[in-house]
Image: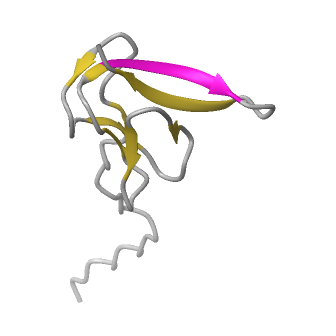
Amino acid sequence: MAHKKAGGSSKNGRDSNSKRLGVKRFGGQLVKAGEILIRQRGTNTHPGLNVGIGKDDTLFAKSAGIVQFTYKGPKKRKTANVITQ
């Protein structure tokens, strides 16, 4: 009987698509209102002056200006701000 032995099954071999998270506009860059500053999971960076937060924790500019990152409060929380001219 010419049989080929069956190959073993593996529990590996899967991967999820990358979600393209991270900083999209860096400190000192000029942004327009509505531009995405950071895509993140959880509030790693908190919204500051002229910055809004989406339901998926995305930070976006509420007005045109220059991006600035600061550390605030006793816990040194990172905040993203947009400084208008």
- Magenta span covers which residues? 66-72
Residue shown at 29% from the left, 39% from the top: 62
Residue 74 at x, y = what percent? 81, 31
Residue 53, placed above or below residue 1: above
Residue shown at 23% from the left, 26% from the top: 64
Provide the major secondary structure of the magenta segment: strand
Quadrant of the image occupied by residue 52:
top left
Residue 11 at x, y = what percent? 46, 71
Q: Does residue 71 belong to the magenta stretch? A: yes
Q: Quadrant of the N terminus?
A: bottom left
Quadrant of the image occupied by residue 50:
top left
Residue 81 at x, y = what percent? 44, 27
Residue 19, placed above or below residue 70: below
Q: Does residue 26 belong to the magenta stretch? A: no
Give the residue at the far bottom of this rendering.
1
Residue 29, placed above or below residue 33: above
In the figure, is residue 11 to the left or right of 60?
A: right
Q: Quadrant of the C terminus?
A: top left
As rendered, which of 13 and 9 lies closer to the eye? 13
Residue 34, placed above or below residue 9: above
